Image (spheres, helix red, strand yellow):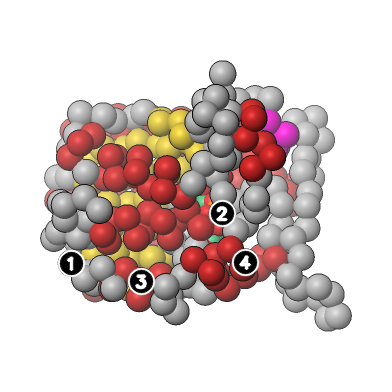
Amino acid sequence: MSERKLSGKVAVVTGGARGLGRGYALRLAGLGADVAIIDRNLRAADVYEFERKAMTAATVMSECEERGVRAIGIEADLTSRAAAKSAIDHVARELGRIDIAVCNAGGGTVLFADERQPVPGANEAADVVTTGTPSDCSEEMLARVLDINLKTTMYTCMAVAVYMKRQRGGKIITVSSTAGVDARGAYHPYGMAKAAIIHYTRSLAQELGPFNVNVNAIAPGIIRTGRLGDRSHMAGMTALRREGTIDDCAKVVEFLATDLSDYVTGRTIVIDGGLVR
Ligand SMILES: NC(=O)c1ccc[n+]([C@@H]2O[C@H](COP(=O)([O-])OP(=O)(O)OC[C@H]3O[C@@H](n4cnc5c(N)ncnc54)[C@H](O)[C@@H]3O)[C@@H](O)[C@H]2O)c1
């Protein structure tokens, strides 16, 4: 692990209760940052065996504390602007400031097991696979996918911008996807929501640049998490001939959250092993 160059800094990670978000939280905690996890389900790791097995403590907050930093968890649905503002205000009150925000909460067109309303007698562990096309997408799916990706990102950014402008400094990292860069993806309208995040990132970088706030996006490709399962059969589509790991993405987040990227803003870093050509 690198030196603790984020000591004294406070990082917020949305959707940090499992998967990639958990990886970002642990990486930033390892660098010495105090961490706030905001997730609609702080026990989201319980849903998938891959995530459950990765956990070294009951919660991601405890795992961060094991790295010698302060950590808090807030359960909030970030599709509401009021809920996002209240969660970020809570972080600032509890931890004193906000230096880094990783806007990772999001998801695809698949309705995942823990998003479903309980159906008596149904298999609660099952995901419901749905997808749309650019010429045919249900209103419900369009609203849901834009809400969980674009709105969660924008509302988190709006809330942290208040603190970062006041502090005259900060690092915002938004999360797009290769689906937001490559129009051939089959995940409509997910790709569209993730493309909008790239544009939002560029605009926000222009607005916050004079306040010494860097705003950049990452666009992961095929990364192994519990939610998406083993996709090693797709490795041949990448130049590096392997699926990506959570750590592959966390390393780029470290770059964007630290002074290594002080003169980088408004950019999108694709983390895909050469998938998009
Ligand atoms: N895994 C990949 O291959 C991949 C590739 C490209 C982009 N991404 C993006 O990376 C991010 C994380 O992906 P993951 O695979 O770790 O997913 P995941 O489902 O394991 O984690 C997402 C987390 O976000 C939380 N969340 C979702 N909606 C929320 C809301 N409205 N409010 C608060 N919390 C919410 C969930 O509870 C969950 O803990 C997502 O934005 C995803 O679109 C993932």
**The residue at label 4 has a CB less than 8 Å from ligand 1:** yes
Dots 2 and 3: beta carbons under 8 Å? no
Q: CA distance from mark 2 to mark 4?
A: 9 Å
Disc 3 is placed on an element classified as helix
Q: Earlier in the sequence, mark 1 or mark 3?
A: 3
Q: Earlier in the sequence, mark 2 or mark 1?
A: 1
Q: Earlier in the sequence, mark 4 or mark 1?
A: 4
Q: Residue furthest top?
A: 277
Q: Which residue in the structure is indicated by mark 4?
A: 48
The magenta-colored residue range is 185-189
Q: Residue 226 sits in which quadrant?
A: bottom right
**Magenta-drawn stretch contains 69:** no
**The residue at label 2 has a CB less than 8 Å from ligand 1:** yes
Q: Which residue in the structure is indicated by mark 3?
A: 63
What's under tag 1, amino acid-wise? Gly
The answer to which of 233 and 39 lies nearer the viewer is 233
Q: CA distance from mark 2 to mark 3?
A: 18 Å
Q: CA distance from mark 2 to mark 1?
A: 32 Å
The label on residue 40 is none
Q: CA distance from mark 1 to mark 3?
A: 21 Å
Disc 1 is placed on an element classified as loop
Marks 2 and 1: which is nearer the front?
2
Q: Where does the image place residue 214, in percent across and percent down from the top left?
A: 26, 37
The label on residue 96 is 1
Provide the major secondary structure of the magenta segment: loop
